Image (tube, rainbow, N blue to C red):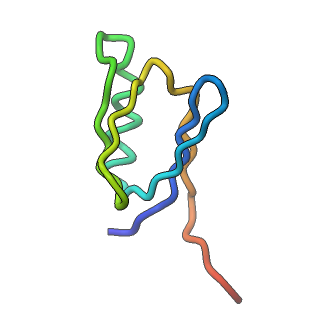
Amino acid sequence: MALRNVDVGFQGGQVLTLRLDEGEHRALVDALRSAGEGRSVHTVRAQEAEVVLDLARVAYVRCELAEQRVGF
């Protein structure tokens, strides 16, 4: 599965960049949508590491739409 860069921005301005597959990205977005229903943390399994996010502190998630290529 292709990996994409996903930026997770937090209140206060910090940004965490992770390389996620589509399933992990979708799970993160779904967790953020249900964060108001009592969920406060979510574990993301990225290529680099496993990260536990405090969903109440996440300001945005940005995902690349297309693969980055070098050259023509």
The location of residue 69, given as percent across then percent down, is 62, 79
The location of residue 40, given as percent across then percent down, is 33, 18
Q: How many marks?
A: 0
Q: Residue at x 53, y 44 (%)?
A: 16
Q: Is residue 11 left or right of residue 44?
A: right
Nearest to the observer: residue 37 or residue 7: 7
Q: Is residue 49 left or right of residue 16?
A: left
The location of residue 33, given as percent across then percent down, is 40, 24
The location of residue 23, given as percent across then percent down, is 31, 51
Q: Residue at x 61, y 35 (%)?
A: 14
- In the rendered image, which quarter contains the N terminus? bottom left
Q: Residue at x 38, y 32 (%)?
A: 53
Q: Quadrant of residue 46?
A: bottom left
In the displayed structure, would residue 67 be above or below residue 56?
below
In the displayed structure, would residue 28 be above or below residue 71?
above
Nearest to the observer: residue 8 or residue 22: 8
- In the rendered image, which quarter contains the C terminus? bottom right
Point out the residue furthest to the bottom here.
Answer: 72
Q: Residue at x 58, y 35 (%)?
A: 9
